[in-house]
Amino acid sequence: MAHYKELKREAYEANIALPAKGLINLTFGNASAVDRKRGVFAIKPSGVGYDDLRPEDMVIVDFEGERVEGKLNPSSDTPTHRRLLTAYPQIGGVVHTHSSHATAFAQAGRAIPIFGTTHADYFNGDVPVTRKMTPQEISTAYEWETGNVIVECIGNIDPLDLPGVLVNRHAPFTWGVSVAKAVEVAVAVECIAQMAIMSLQLAPSLPQIETELLTKHFQRKHGPNAYYGQKPPPT
Amino acid sequence: MAHYKELKREAYEANIALPAKGLINLTFGNASAVDRKRGVFAIKPSGVGYDDLRPEDMVIVDFEGERVEGKLNPSSDTPTHRRLLTAYPQIGGVVHTHSSHATAFAQAGRAIPIFGTTHADYFNGDVPVTRKMTPQEISTAYEWETGNVIVECIGNIDPLDLPGVLVNRHAPFTWGVSVAKAVEVAVAVECIAQMAIMSLQLAPSLPQIETELLTKHFQRKHGPNAYYGQKPPPT
Amino acid sequence: MAHYKELKREAYEANIALPAKGLINLTFGNASAVDRKRGVFAIKPSGVGYDDLRPEDMVIVDFEGERVEGKLNPSSDTPTHRRLLTAYPQIGGVVHTHSSHATAFAQAGRAIPIFGTTHADYFNGDVPVTRKMTPQEISTAYEWETGNVIVECIGNIDPLDLPGVLVNRHAPFTWGVSVAKAVEVAVAVECIAQMAIMSLQLAPSLPQIETELLTKHFQRKHGPNAYYGQKPPPT
Amino acid sequence: MAHYKELKREAYEANIALPAKGLINLTFGNASAVDRKRGVFAIKPSGVGYDDLRPEDMVIVDFEGERVEGKLNPSSDTPTHRRLLTAYPQIGGVVHTHSSHATAFAQAGRAIPIFGTTHADYFNGDVPVTRKMTPQEISTAYEWETGNVIVECIGNIDPLDLPGVLVNRHAPFTWGVSVAKAVEVAVAVECIAQMAIMSLQLAPSLPQIETELLTKHFQRKHGPNAYYGQKPPPT
């Protein structure tokens, strides 16, 4: 249907950006973009290679998880996206990757410690790692429960102030006011994970960045006094 | 002969994918594709650079190791491919690379430990490393014996459930229902080796992934209840 | 105005070289080029993606920090550039990146130790790291004070003999007789940081390069007896 | 002169291959090709960027070190090339890079230990590191003396059986029957250095490869019984 064309284009652009930016091997990842008015989101079809992907292949799914348009199966991670998109009306898209350095932290069950200003431009503290999922969560509605442990990890924080987490033993999920912003955060998460692992190699007991510097950098880009960029950022 | 044209094309595509995907430097690798009906396989010629390779350069070899078609010498690793292709009628191709991170594990004589879901999407446990070859195995039919230690390492497992191993002191070999699938596994093996080495750096005593999560992810892509992708996968 | 066209072009070329050379992700960096006669410099606009950047987008700023030409906001790091450009009349441009390996050292608060001739071709010793900034420096004129700690770190050395430093918890800044030279130093700093972290892994107590070899290589490219290249270098 | 055209082309192709294969940043490296009949070699001009390099820029130098043709200064490393080319009539070219992983070993003063078959395809043992140069060697004919410590390190071995060494605190030099072969060895040295540093991370006390396997692989490509490739290799 023609009225999903723009939404599919938006989701498509985000999905193909993931391998282009070096965040994805094979089909290890996916992106979704939401249309709040229509109560649907567009997401990558499951297991389709990025080289073959076309905008019209995006699958339209509603907030109950029903496929509204498209012939292909949506990503097997669709319930995780749906859990996040319904929990947080302020976000416009979700990105999931298995980017190497961030996934190394996730596998190790460690948060990405906040060591410098690169990190503080995007996060107000460590990139947290969720608790491990229980055998019951894994054996029942696994992908939906994956969303639940993310929501539990975010807690009372505004998700736009904590735009990504690592799922334990799994990999990062990120989000933002738009799916394009979620892609940007996914790039930042991989970048700061790479820097953090090397800083830990150089200084195994390195404490986190000093509070004043963290706050300064985070507020350069977030909140009422933000002064980075060409206009106040949307958050 | 014209009736090998498709087989050569299939083997050629797999071979040139290896440097394109960053798995191979110089001529450190090769791929073979089998035609079970005709009892032959197509394989890369020995020592020919990937830039110069053409589909018609692929060498056709039968299951006794005789060159059936082609003027060039087949890969020096041909007996290893032949050993695997004859041992396992369910596989359609074999890939050998010296991809950096996987080879680092092989050289160290260590299996790639299964730390996360990326790994569990392809393997039901560690990517094993073979025992070391004996001086006698090395000094006689070296490449054939390389195949033998791989077969010994696989044991009674269905090779489609264990689609790759590391040869001790050497490098990875992978396989699948098709040579294209074997290339995909080779990409996955390098990717999970890179993540594993970093997870070990972050958590030197990291235990393997919890059984429930491992089983869940492996079965998302394998077996009768697989639900990843657009149709039940062939295995 | 047409008389800034060349200056904008020079700054633009330096800015787009940064992602092209792998020194920058997202918008983590910027470059400025100075016109001493007119008392102005051209710098990247804040938060504009490199893909979208055009030469005419460069912002012209004078030495008091006033925007002389351009509709976009200049980089939020403009006061740091201005501090360096006004402190050192012998430099023609400044580059700031968050290149991964150099930033890993900056985050860890460690200088990049001088271990080999690659490093000695550009620096006469370690690439120093500044002291940490005080809460007061951070909360007031943060970006200007960032320039101040760099100036304090350089001390009485000719900045052309010490063409870059790491800002603690932040990332590298480099400079040179031209902004093109500052880009070259930024590449060198990332390269030697990568080598240094690996040399430290291989030899954790590695002492710095021997004085004679350091002096020999530094003087091949610097000073009255330089003999590298096609003519005596400008410094 | 037209009769150097082919030689210049050969040297040019080798030089531009170095950044194309990721072995060189900036102008950190050079390649030379020899014409034994005319008693000259072609080498990169000093400090000229690879993007700007043209075949006709190659400088022709004779075995006494005199420039025979060309207006540009030859590489500052020319005496090192000349030392090796005159010491070893069996080699056809020399390559020098500062490739990252190999240089990390050189800076640390460590040989690259031979851990696997990738390494054994090119070297019959560790890639050795020279002794450190003396202050006197450094302060006099530095680049010529660099060649001397390489020659001292090779000792009585046929340089075609030991096609590269690491100069202590500096970086790798490689050679071969042709400059194209020297480029190939330079790629191999970087590749095995990268694997070795990771194998050491996985197994800090890893012993070298077993003798039988080393000999087998080295002799697959070298000596009278070589069977790799399409014909007996030239060595």
Image (cartoon, coloured by chain):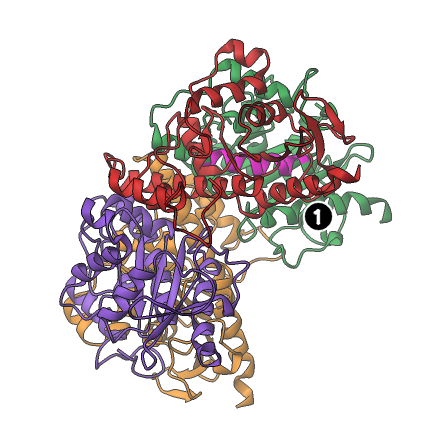
Chain colours: A orange, B purple, C green, D red
The relative height of residue D15 versus residue A57 in the rendered view (above or below) is: above
Give the image location of residue D143, x and y in percent: 58, 20
Q: Residue at x 15, y 71 (%)?
A: A136
User: Chain letter of disc 1?
Assistant: C
Q: Residue at x 68, y 15 (%)?
A: C225
Answer whether residue C185 is magenta in the image: yes
Answer whether residue A73 is magenta in the image: no
Q: Quadrant of residue C164?
A: top right
Which segment did they paint magenta? C181-194
Give the image location of residue C57, x and y in percent: 72, 53
**Which of these two is toward me, A92 or D160?**
D160
Relative horizontal placement of residue B92, taking residue C125 as reference (left or right): left
Give the image location of residue C175, x and y in percent: 64, 32
**Which of these two is toward me, A144 or D231?**
D231
The relative height of residue A172 versus residue B169 in the rendered view (above or below) is: below
Q: Residue at x 47, y 69 (%)?
A: B13
Work out which residue is located at the far top of the displayed protein and give it.
D136
The relative height of residue B105 versus residue A145 in the rendered view (above or below) is: above
The residue to which callout 1 is attached is C12
Q: Quadrant of residue C202?
A: top left
Work out which residue is located at the far left of the displayed protein and give it.
B156
Looking at numbered disc 1 in the image, what kind of residue is underneath it?
A: Tyr
Relative horizontal placement of residue A10, taking residue C53 as reference (left or right): left
Relative horizontal placement of residue D205, taking residue D27 as reference (left or right): left
Picture mark count: 1
Any part of residue C68 in sight: no
